[in-house]
Amino acid sequence: MNLKGKTALVTGGGTGIGKATALNLAKLGANIVINYSRSAKDAEETLKEVEALGVKGTIFQADVSNDADVQKMVKHTVNTFGSVDILINNAGTTKFVEFHDLDGLQSEDFDQMFGVNAKGIFFTTRACAHELKRNKGSVVNVASIAGLYAGGSSIAYCASKAAAISITKTLAKTLAPEVRVNAVAPGIVMTRWVEGKEDHIRRLAEDTPLGRCATPEDVAEVIVSLVAQAGFVTGQVVVIDGGANL
């Protein structure tokens, strides 16, 4: 696999799955644009690691639920590197509310989660569509098993990730044949989203077929393979949960 000279835009690229993906793409030679909304310090640290791999990188602050922000981010990407070849829609947000607590979710919670987790995918892909088509590019959206099964951090989160999966399929059809659009659906991943719950999660994972939780690197491996190797795959959702939902 060689992505030398390609440009990858990774939303939510400063931490977790986004960071691991940015670094893996950089190892294959791609220039990296790291998007962040609030984690400026993390994005700057990730940029240093990217550049240490011998490729070029830049960071850009944007709220992916804001179409104007997204348009500016993509313009910056093209002005800096001349193209967009790879788009990783990884930015996400949630609110932890037990399913039975129906009053725990407010209208603004749905707005925020759908804004980032669903509309953000559409806005960013739309803004990149011309460049992606011109370069026969690839898009990978980070969804979740919460979009496939009745389990997750909240009902609103599950709904937003189901929407992300639907958007993946419709965009795959819309942007074909030039652009491939796929999604990954991770189970629980050991990121800062689960801080304070690590031991509990590890105990639960012991009963799954592979006996452990996913790491950001586990998810990044699949994302990068969809970008760099799976040339006849589009509109698909790859579950990454160690067999937990068999």
Image (spheres, rainbow, N blue to C red):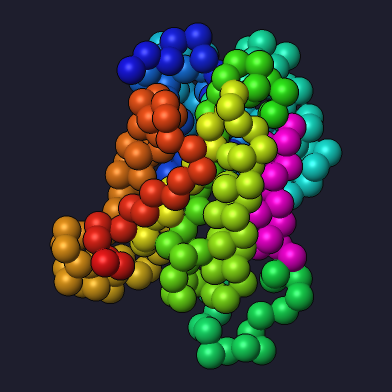
Q: Position of residue 85 (x, y in %)?
A: 57, 21
Q: Quadrant of residue 231?
A: top left
Chief secondary structure of the magenta portion: helix
Residue 224 visible: no
**Seen in the image, is 11 located left or right of residue 119?**
left
**Vertical relation: 98 (above or below) 182:** below
In magenta stretch: residue 121 = yes
Q: Position of residue 125 (x, y in %)?
A: 67, 36
Q: Residue at x 54, y 68 (%)?
A: 158
| Quadrant occupied by the N terminus | top left
Q: Quadrant of residue 29?
A: top left
**Vertical relation: 144 (above or below) 3:** below
Residue 75 visible: yes
| Quadrant occupied by the C terminus | bottom left
Between 202 and 173, the residue placed more toward the observer is: 173
**Seen in the image, is 211 located left or right of residue 115?**
left
Q: Position of residue 115 (x, y in %)?
A: 71, 56
Q: Position of residue 129 (x, y in %)?
A: 69, 29
**Vertical relation: 207 (above or below) 121:** below
Q: Farthest residue to the right: give it.
A: 68
Q: Quadrant of residue 20?
A: top left
Give, as a single range, the part of the protein colored magenta. 111-127
Q: Residue at x 55, y 79 (%)?
A: 97
**Vertical relation: 77 (above or below) 68:** above
